[in-house]
Amino acid sequence: MFENTLIQSDQHWAVWAILISAAAFGLWAEKTRWGSRLSAVVVSILAAFILSNLSIIPSQAEGYDVWSYLVPLAIPLLLFKADLRMTIRKQDQLCWHLFLGPLEPCWERCLHLPSFLLA
């Protein structure tokens, strides 16, 4: 719509700063009476939507691409929090579920039972 915005699409740090500020605003708003009726995610999305429509942030930017910035940061943070000992202990149970899961529709058709009876 508008090509000239206050923050240009090549200013990655400024775009991320605004998006993090919108997320912080959403978390704060969730503690208020009007924000508790919505969730922090909805308030954050609405804040970013309003900022984009007011031409403060660009409607398209490379910083919005989650796979290039956020996922490479999130994977190590999630692995630091993972309980690897429990994962190794539960590995055999998980493998059986992954193996038997695709066979469940075949099992239903053979027995002609609805799936909720097999669970």
Image (cartoon, rainbow, N blue to C red):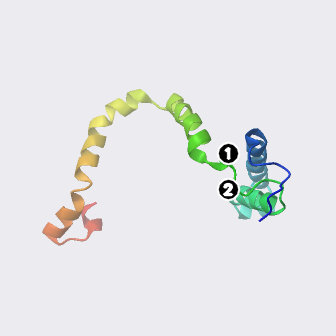
Q: Amino acid at mark 1?
A: Gly
Q: Quadrant of the C terminus?
A: bottom left
Report which residue position mark 2 lands on: 41
- Point 61% across, 39% down: residue: 69
Question: Is 5 located above or below residue 105 in the figure?
Answer: above
| Mark 2 in CB contact with mark 1 (< 8 angstroms) | no
Residue nearest the viewer, comparing 23 with 65: 65
- Looking at marks 2 and 1 on the same chain, the residue that comes earlier in the sequence is marked by 2
Q: Quadrant of the N terminus?
A: bottom right
Q: Nearer the viewer, mark 2 or mark 1?
A: 1
Residue neighbourhood size for the residue with mark 1, other residues' Cα within 10 Å, grouped as few (<14), some (14–19), many (≥20):
some
Question: Is 82 located above or below residue 41 in the figure?
Answer: above
Question: Where residue 80 sits: x, y (%)?
Answer: 53, 28
Residue 32: mark: none
**For residue 48, which quarter of the picture?**
bottom right
Residue 63: mark: 1
Helix, strand or loop under label 1: helix
